[in-house]
Amino acid sequence: MADRFLKKIVRLRSQNYTCSRRTMRFSTTAAGTEEKCLQQTQSGSKSVNLFTAINQALHVALETDPRSYVFGEDVSFGGVFRCTTGLADRFGRHRVFNTPLCEQGIVGFGIGLAAMGNRAIAEIQFADYIFPAFDQIVNEAAKFRYRSGNQFNCGGLTIRAPYGAVGHGGHYHSQSPEAFFCHVPGIKVVIPRSPQQAKGLLLSCIRDPNPIVFFEPKWLYRLAVEEVPENDYMLPLSEAEVIREGSDITLVGWGAQLSVMEQACSEAEKGGISCELIDLKTLIPWDKETVEASVRKTGRLLVSHEAPITGGFGAEISASIVERCFLRLEAPVARVCGLDTPFPLVFEPFYMPTKNKILDAIKSTVNY
Amino acid sequence: MALSAHRSTATTLLRHLSAATATIPSLRNLSTDSANPLTIETSVPFTGHKIDPPTRSVETNSQELMTFFRDMALMRRMEIAADSLYKAKLIRGFCHLYDGQEAVAVGMEAAINKKDCIITAYRDHCTFLGRGGSLYETFAELMGRKDGCSKGKGGSMHFYKKESGFFGGHGIVGAQIPLGCGLAFAQKYNKDENVTFTLYGDGAANQGQLFEALNMAALWDLPAILVCENNHYGMGTAEWRSAKSPAYYKRGDYVPGLKVDGMDVLAVKQACKFAKEHALKNGPIILEMDTYRYHGHSMSDPGSTYRTRDEISAMRQERDPIERVRKLLLSHDIAQEKELKDIEKEVRKEVDEAIAKAKECPMPDPSELFTNVYVKGFGTESFGADRKEVRAVLP
């Protein structure tokens, strides 16, 4: 049913490493809230790419709440990835505005704006540039509510930033810094995998009463295209989704990596291995129950992300599942991640957790 | 355009003499700079902030002007070639071109020596060339080949040349500025009598790090020269949209500053010479170079959505740094039009040859992915399936 929305043609991200175009399809099986959400909104939908879906979400956010603001470097011109196109013209430059090039200032300003009861939607141009703002996020935003005994908060703050590899981005336009933020109680970290997900999750993030870091897979901005409902809808946070059902091994991932994992699952299926694929969507607080239930069924777990393996969020998932499902596990938890090196320029194909690496890990885990 | 150059009578005389007698070699072949001095006035006066600006009259000579012309033409050609290579997908990653701003790199080098340090952001190809880097190393690095100046591991944004004090090539806007102060502190501590030029753009001028660095530099009287290359657009944002005061030379408050025509190579040279003397005696100074980039911010920016094509072509016609020198050379009768055209042809050939050679150069060995993450001697090794993990054994 929701499959209709999830049909997409994606020029797969692995093209630079392997070859060609393929058709990608996420088959959805998870029922519940999300499907209901979508049912209500089937009135009108269009096939759009991910940046357009983000753009739609921002239009909706600004339209539905007069106290919402969008700001960041170059956003009033539409942003470097065109996510904020048309916002300034429609809502005015007092609500959609460019900031100087100062990430620490952008986030700190956003915290103040949110503390006055507004929805501050800040853009950091690349996730790689978020580190000057790390102090504001970790020490100011995340702890504001706690340390003021709930007198103040910056729950209206949402920080959007494009993350991840694009095939040729080099050291400072490719990193996946999500794990740093997953170590910070008080903020949420959300990463969508597709246009339809991006719109619903972003609207949830903007309206969630907690500060959120929302990482957008920049590789998919133009490549991922699917049917996206045109109206206002939200997808629940902290709820993982089983996007492919299987019985032999559970794969957990998020964002752009899911399309690579999906390919590996299809390949594995040809060899008779039935894979269950889970999109975590919210990294903290994450949906342990869905992952646990799946691993109890399959007895095996593989986690994959682009960020370096050591200290990556895969480590946390692995540890939690081992704690909960120790006696059900039939093989060690496998992690297929980026290498423990800086994100490389010319070595990107070696660095990336590619389909073949995942496929190898699936086989060795199942045959353990 | 006010090309207010004064012809030195002495030089004219000399030139006439040399033309007349066969015993005196042609001016351009003279190896001694002092043989044919010229004094040329800068396009506009310098403007000082809490400091008396240097004189507009710049000492130079015909040979230096010819070198300026050649160096800038080479840089221009190199950047245009990089543009094509990027479009042909031979250069990957992010690529920021310097064409239009050549006078800053060239003028600065003319005033300092290789023991002075330079540190800049990601628009670094020409600064590298100015520091003595070769075209081959440049193109090899741009294309990620192993003979590149960073062994092909850095790419466009990360050029370095340690032996001539070029500390690179930094990817994060403004992050190199405090580093420059650290370099200057070391120079002062070692009593080197050298200075550090820290370059940043008008966009970076709004980063908090700049002000942290300025305070430290002034507090400890460091020989730090902060060079704001003001090309008037921080990516797509015009300076006045992002800066309350676009008078960047004044924004050091307690740190003196100088506004310089960054399209006039002689003005840049004069300012840098002046700044070096000042910094060694009195501590930091800001130089705001009023310059212009012809290309967009990076290769993904056509550069024409936030400024008019008229503005760009007017800049090319009226303030182009290479054309300025060309006019000086012609008006002082130092070179003929044809000779300059020949230089440009020569330069084009050099660039093409370097590209051809760089294309032949292999990519670095995949094992290089694991080197230089930690110090080798510390026992870094890669292990595991696919060698996907790096272990650094501490001594």
Image (cartoon, coloured by chain):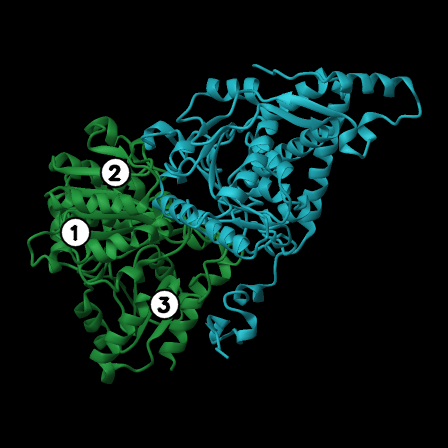
Chain colours: A green, B cyan
Amino acid type, residue under disc 2 in the picture: Phe
Amino acid type, residue under disc 1 in the picture: Leu
Quarter location, residue B234: top left
Q: Mark 1 lies on which chain?
A: A
Can residue A143 be spotted in the picture? yes
x then y, percent, for residue B220 = 43, 50
Quarter location, residue A292: bottom left
Q: Which residue is drawn at 33% across and 32% down?
A: B242
Which residue is outermost to the bottom?
A: A327
Residue identifier under label 2: A71
Can residue A44 be spotted in the picture? no
Badge number at residue A313: none
Callout 1: SS:
loop
Question: Mark 1 vs mark 3: same chain?
Answer: yes
Mark in front: 1 vs 3: 1
Classify residue A212 as left or right of residue B255: left
The total of numbered circles placed on residues is 3
Amino acid type, residue under disc 3 in the picture: Glu
x then y, percent, for residue A130 = 33, 51
Badge number at residue A269: 3
Q: Residue at x 63, y 56 (%)?
A: B146
Label 2 – label 1 distance at C-alpha: 24 Å
Dot 1, how many residues are within 10 Å of its Cα: few (below 14), some (14-19), or many (20+)?
A: many
Badge number at residue A235: 1
Mark in front: 2 vs 1: 2
Q: Which chain carries label 2?
A: A
